[in-house]
């Protein structure tokens, strides 16, 4: 049987006068995994935590997710649990201690075809319940001149077909990271049920990606 090679990074920070908010980052990197022992990620397999929201950042390159994680855990209004992964599925070995994941974010580097392929291949390991407002896509390097227009169109079509939001982020500047973090926190709090009178499905319907009518039309330029 193939052995799991796993590295973990965990940080706990106490905030508030009584230290009641616990913020945790945990990074799981999986190599040489026995794929027969993988699990389908389900959104309602566990009870929610009190004033707690959990987010899973999935990025094949592992370039932007750590910066986002460091920024996300600075949130003090709620307890934010951040899980990082290169791809799905996640090994069953860690399933028992894994919190309920309220939001799954696929980070796609548009300069890498592999980044998109990895995200697309990971989708089948999500329970359909996640596509009711608990999945979003975030792309980087959209302004890079080397990015083929067709690749961005493909990502848009994928997000639109799944009725998911598509966020654009600047990963090279502190302001870009801060803006991306703020947008993710807004979606995460709703997905975790922490915003009164708002649901993940309702927010998703308002923010989901749509494909321009002429995206499939031939270009005559």
Image: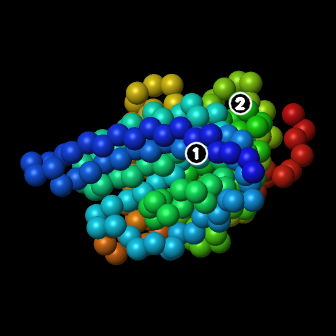
The quarter holding residue 35 reads bottom right
Front residue of 186 and 122: 122
Is disc 2 surrounded by few (<14), some (14 to 19) or many (20+) residues within 10 Å?
Answer: some
User: Residue 40 location in percent, x, y?
Assistant: 65, 65
Question: In this orientation, which residue lies closer to the viewer: 150 or 104?
Answer: 104
**Residue lying at 48% horizontally and 40% vertically, measured from the top left:** 8
- In the image shown, does 91 or 158 lie closer to the viewer? 91
Comparing marks 1 and 2, which lies closer to the viewer? Answer: 1
Could you classify mark 1 by the number of other residues whose Cα lies within 10 Å: few (under 14), some (14-19), or many (20 or more)? Answer: many
Q: How is the rendered protein coloured?
A: rainbow
Q: Position of residue 60 (x, y in %)?
A: 66, 39
Identify the image quadrant of the C terminus.
top right
- Residue 201: give x, y in percent of width and height: 51, 72
Q: Are marks 1 and 2 in contact (CB under 8 Å)?
A: no
* Residue at x 77% of width, y 36% of height: 113
* Marks 1 and 2, how far apart at CA: 20 Å
Label drawn at residue 85 = 1
Mark 1 residue element: strand
In the rendered structure, the answer to whether residue 120 lies left or right of residue 7 reads: right
Instruction: Check disc 2 and report the residue beneath it.
Output: 111
Secondary structure beneath dot 2 equals loop
Q: Position of residue 82 (x, y in %)?
A: 43, 49
- Residue that appears at 67% across and 40% down: 31
Query: Is residue 158 among what the camera can see?
Result: no
217 on left or right of 170: right
Q: Which residue lies at the image location 90% right of the left edge and 38% below the top edge?
A: 220
The answer to which of marks 1 and 2 sits earlier in the sequence is 1
Vertically, is 129 above or below 163? Answer: below
Q: How many marks?
A: 2
Q: Is residue 59 left or right of residue 195?
A: right
On the question of residue 67 being in view, the answer is yes
Residue 196: quadrant of the picture: bottom left
């Amino acid at each position: 049987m193939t052995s799991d090679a796993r590295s973990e990074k965990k940080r706990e920070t106490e905030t508030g006068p009584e230290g009641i908010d616990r913020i945790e980052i945990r990074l799981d990197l999986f190599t040489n995994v026995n794929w027969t022992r993988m699990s389908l990620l389900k959104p309602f397999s566990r009870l929610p935590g009190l004033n707690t929201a959990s987010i899973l950042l999935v990025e094949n390159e592992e370039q932007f997710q750590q910066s986002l994680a460091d920024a996300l855990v600075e949130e003090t209004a709620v307890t934010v649990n951040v899980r990082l992964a290169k791809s799905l599925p996640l090994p069953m070995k860690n399933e028992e201690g894994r919190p309920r994941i309220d939001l799954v974010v696929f980070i796609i580097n548009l300069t890498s075809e592999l980044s998109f392929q990895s995200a697309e291949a990971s989708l089948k390991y999500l329970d359909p319940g996640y596509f009711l407002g608990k999945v979003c896509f975030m792309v980087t390097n959209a302004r890079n001149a080397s990015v083929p227009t067709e690749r961005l169109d493909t990502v848009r079509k994928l997000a639109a077909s799944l009725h998911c939001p598509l966020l654009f982020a600047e990963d090279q500047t502190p302001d870009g990271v801060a803006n991306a973090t703020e947008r993710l926190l807004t979606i995460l709090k709703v997905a975790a049920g922490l915003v009164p009178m708002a649901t993940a499905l309702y927010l998703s319907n308002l923010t989901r990606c749509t494909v321009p009518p002429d995206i499939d039309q031939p270009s005559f330029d």
